[in-house]
Amino acid sequence: MTLTAAQRGAPPGEAPGAISVRNLNMVFGAPGGDVIALQNANLEIGAGEFISLIGPSGCGKTTLLRLMADLTQPTSGEIRVNGLTPTRAREQRAYGYVFQAPALFEWRSVLNNVTLPLEVMDFPKNERKARAEQMLRLVGLQNFTRSYPWQLSGGMQQRVSIARALAFDPQILLMDEPFGALDEITRENLNMELLRLWRETGKTVVFVTHSISEAVFLSTRVVVMTSRPGKIEGVVDIDLPQPRGAEVRELPRFFELATQVRELLRRGHGFDLHE
Ligand SMILES: Nc1ncnc2c1ncn2[C@@H]1O[C@H](COP(=O)(O)OP(=O)(O)OP(=O)(O)O)[C@@H](O)[C@H]1O
């Protein structure tokens, strides 16, 4: 397995740029007045990095992810994905998107949920099945290909949606709080699986979460955002050793990094840290 620069712990500058966000602004018109969802956001994400976006409700995390995915257009500023506009990058299948809820089709088997994007993209029939089976193996669901979504637990359903997002082998995985609705133990197990998958595939991941420990455990860098207006308050480099197992959560450095993230979140709220 070849580790990317980010996985080796090299500074982000060494890796070629995967996503570049420059002077990005997003304003939504609303009856009570305009909402500044994002104000002057700047961020460089290297290929193979695992970036978490964390911040209070309404700080613009989903908006930033949707802008990267070409699901919405900015008021001003620029995003480049592999040097392309988000629209061109989408056309080139540069990213897969995992939503907060699994959004599976109940009447399609697990396998046929994963083949769906490949059907839409006109992949040959044999290849669709082979790819879907491979992705389901990757997320540990090889024995559930014929099951239906309603026969699976919430965690398993979310694994199907990850397999679906990976089916066409995008270089970038955009994930909007995929484990938010799951219990703590399932979430920690899926965190481990996601890290393994990231290491094995070398994908670039942008991951939205509300959980400080999840962000610190998973990421190469944590981007802390604040609200009113939505802004990037700071970025914390996560220099924990790789590969990471459950024991990493017990390291003193883990707690130090979690504290750094928490203090940035508090600063964004205007709390006095020394109270
Ligand atoms: N389509 C829209 N029209 C109007 N306002 C919107 C729209 N989408 C988002 N907003 C507003 O933009 C701000 C940022 O929303 P966004 O969903 O990006 O926040 P978030 O950080 O992802 O929140 P959460 O953690 O609750 O999911 C919020 O104030 C939200 O109400």
Image (tube, rainbow, N blue to C red):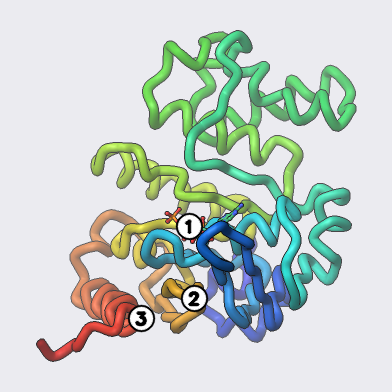
Which residue has dot 2 on it? Answer: 229
Callout 1 environment at 10 Å: few (<14), some (14 to 19), or many (20+)?
Answer: many
Report how far apart the C-alphas of labels 1 and 2 lie in the structure. 18 Å
**Residue 266: image x %, image y %?**
27, 79
Instruction: Label 1: state its secondary structure.
Output: strand
Residue contact at pointers 2 and 3, CB within 8 angstroms: no
Dot 1 amino acid type? Val
Residue at 41% x, 57% y is 209
Q: Is mark 2 within 8 Å of ligand 1?
A: no
Report how far apart the C-alphas of labels 3 and 1 lie in the structure. 17 Å
Q: Earlier in the sequence, mark 1 or mark 2?
A: 1
Residue at 65% x, 30% y is 134
Residue at 50% x, 16% y is 149
**Residue 104: image x %, image y %?**
57, 24
Which residue has dot 1 on it? Answer: 208
Q: Is mark 3 within 8 Å of ligand 1?
A: no
Residue at 73% x, 66% y is 74
Do we see residue 108 in this rendering?
Answer: yes
Q: Which mark is residue 268?
A: 3
Callout 2 environment at 10 Å: few (<14), some (14 to 19), or many (20+)?
Answer: some
* Front one among 60 and 262: 60
Describe residue 228's horizontal placement relative to residue 249 as left or right.
Answer: right
Q: Nearer the viewer, mark 2 or mark 3?
A: 2
Q: Earlier in the sequence, mark 2 or mark 3?
A: 2
